[in-house]
Image (cartoon, grey):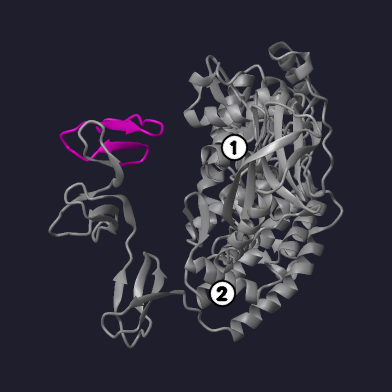
Amino acid sequence: MDNEKLIIVESPAKAKTIEKILGKEFKVLASYGHIRDLPEKELGVDIENNFKPKYVLLPSRKKIIDTIKDLSKKAEKLYLATDPDREGEAIAWHLVEELKLPKEKFTRIEFHEITPRAILEAIKNPREIDLDRVEAQQARRILDRLVGYELSPLLWEKVRKGLSAGRVQSVALRFICEREEEIEKFIPEEYWYIYGEFRDEEKVLYGKLILYKDEEVNVKNEQEVNKIIRILNCLDYRIDKVVIKEEKRTPPPPFITSTLQQEASKRFGFPVGKTMKIAQSLYEGVDIGNERIGLITYMRTDSTRIAPEAREEAVQYIESGFGKEYVGKEHKEKKKLGVQDAHEAIRPTSVFRDPEKIRKYLTDEQFKIYKLIWERFIASQMNHAIFEVVEIYIKGGDYVFLSKGKKLKFAGFMSLYMEKEENGEEKDEVNIDYVPEEGKNVKLTTLIPRQFFTEPPPRYTEATLVRTLEKYGVGRPSTYATIIETLKERKYVEVKDRTLVPTTLGKVVNDFLTKQFPHLIDVKFTARMEEDLDKIESGKVKAIEVLKKFYPAFKEELEKVSKNIGKIQVIEKTDEICPLCGSKLVIRENKNGKYYACSRYPECKYTKPIYEEAQGRCPLCGGVVVKKKAKKTKKTFWGCINYPECRFASPYEPLNEKCPQCGSTMLKGNGFKKCSNKDCNYIVWTGRRKRWKKSK
């Protein structure tokens, strides 16, 4: 391999793509992510020596480091091509430190898309490692280690073993718990709307009562409604005013990490972690015929900036596919505080790789995400949509009804892309077929009162939690997927109907942290910490200043809580009665899940397991089916509650669905549904079908 050039990246998929693009002159190896980290079994931060970190080589990386070390001795040049962000910069620095590379031996290159043009351009324009960026990543790692390593054992001592706390994770949990508390305390309030149907000769208008004596109508109960209706039925009506105006709808900007996560969640129900994995596979490279290439730009970004050549390509595509009038103005990104503008928005590496044309090379999930990114990018460069909005005010005495509607005049970007709306209140807009003349008399034909109740704020979904974290500047979009997964893994939250619901354990941990460490998980404090990390990266502040400002107060709080707070019980009160002593039962949790226990424990030791029920009934006897755990293997399975009389047991969950072939109960597996009847071969695949390998 003498005179060969060596490139180091993080992932094997990325290495494969780059090696295929550059050919035999280059050898590309993957570091498989970080090669060094703080040690697992000790703090690894010398607090007395300016918070100096102690890094150790990860055991799983020793073999690859030995390989890189051997090859680098023979290579003419070593290019560090790790990801273009803080983590990537830190990995490059760790490689230099671990391999003890002299300055003349290596260079750092950076690209934001894995295409021949971008990679060759990066090789022509190498740079030095950005030590400010490395310092910012190191400061974040040290902060997270100080919090996690010192606060988590306190949780083990005061609540339960195996728990964890983190700077951003704990704030995210706080958002979820506070929203649940709002929902629990919410008292619905009654309100009414009154709608009217009016006739202008053969034409019909529908309006909503909005004003009385120029004041907004606010009807709270049926008694008020009946009183108003009696008055309205006695009035004469006319068209008081007609307002016709144009309304422009601006195209959305191209995706950044958080908006991609939100839109994929709303459209496809994808968890944010899944979206990032799919996007990463598109970035790292896909085989398209004889070519292997990255289909999208780097997917960890909070900038909506795009390269001039990408804009030119989009304009060319829009002009040829839609017409010149569909090309929108070039949008210059407004610089926001805290936005890292190191790289572009998420976009296709070429708009001419139409999703439908390359669909056969993609999995169903890759196609969905690629198509979403592709359409969003092109739409962002298109012209705005124009609506004609008509507002018709119908007056009777001192009362005014409003009939409002809109008509699309020019589709613009909406001819290609529409954002998925969140479920919201019912809209009062209607289609208006004609515009009446002002001053014309109309006849009231029907009044329709409708009763409503105010609703509590909705629980967070993964998408709305991401939006909230981003809004308050908590954490970085690239970390949101990991944060949400950690909350689920620790059983602090569970997912119900795609919403995040705090568990009893989650509520207890949140209550403990908010009361004992209010400063640490304060939203504003956490956001300011992110700003400090950005200042470190830009060279405005040194990491040691941030760490010295944070740690002493945190350590003091830890010591105070450790001395003054006793053990906290994780229990949930119920109205169930203990069959042994008549006391109330409570719900407790352990590593196996929830169970009923007597509130008089340890005097009364009654317990009863709480089972997770299947969606459907037992295919054999119609009884309830619950999730159980085998005593020997510890594997979970679905079994009938009527055991041993009924011996139904299956790794697959019974559904509330019948087989279309034989009428038996359907069972749900991983990516498929099949009939429970062993004599029926009906199966339907709901995910990507696995290729089964024959055992040897």
Please name the residue that numbered disc 1 is placed on. Answer: 68
Q: Position of residue 5 (x, y in %)?
A: 66, 26
Range of the magenta residues? 667-696
Relative to 155, is 541 above or below? above
Relative to 242, is 531 above or below? below
Q: In this rendering, does residue 32 appear at all?
A: no
Task: State the residue in front, 217 or 180.
Answer: 217
Q: Position of residue 286 (x, y in %)?
A: 55, 25
Secondary structure category for the residue under label 1: helix
Question: What residue is drawn where x is 56% and y is 74%?
Answer: 154
Query: In the displayed image of the protein, which residue is found farthest to the left?
Result: 645
- Of pointers 1 and 2, the one earlier in the residue sequence: 1
Task: Tell me if label 1 and label 2 are in contact, CB under 8 Å.
Answer: no
Q: Amino acid at mark 1?
A: Ile
Relative to 611, is 273 above or below? above
Classify residue 165 by image quadrant. bottom right
Q: In this rendering, does residue 87 appear at all?
A: yes
Question: What residue is drawn where x is 68% and y is 35%?
Answer: 255
Label 1 – label 2 distance at C-alpha: 41 Å
Please name the residue that numbered disc 2 is placed on. Answer: 154
Left or right: where 609 falls relative to 109? left
Task: State the residue in front, 35 or 105.
Answer: 35
Q: Position of residue 259 (x, y in %)?
A: 66, 41
Q: Amino acid at mark 2?
A: Leu
Task: State the residue in front, 515 or 251.
Answer: 251
Q: Is residue 678 magenta?
A: yes
Tag nearer the camera, 1 or 2:
2
Q: Position of residue 586 (x, y in %)?
A: 39, 76
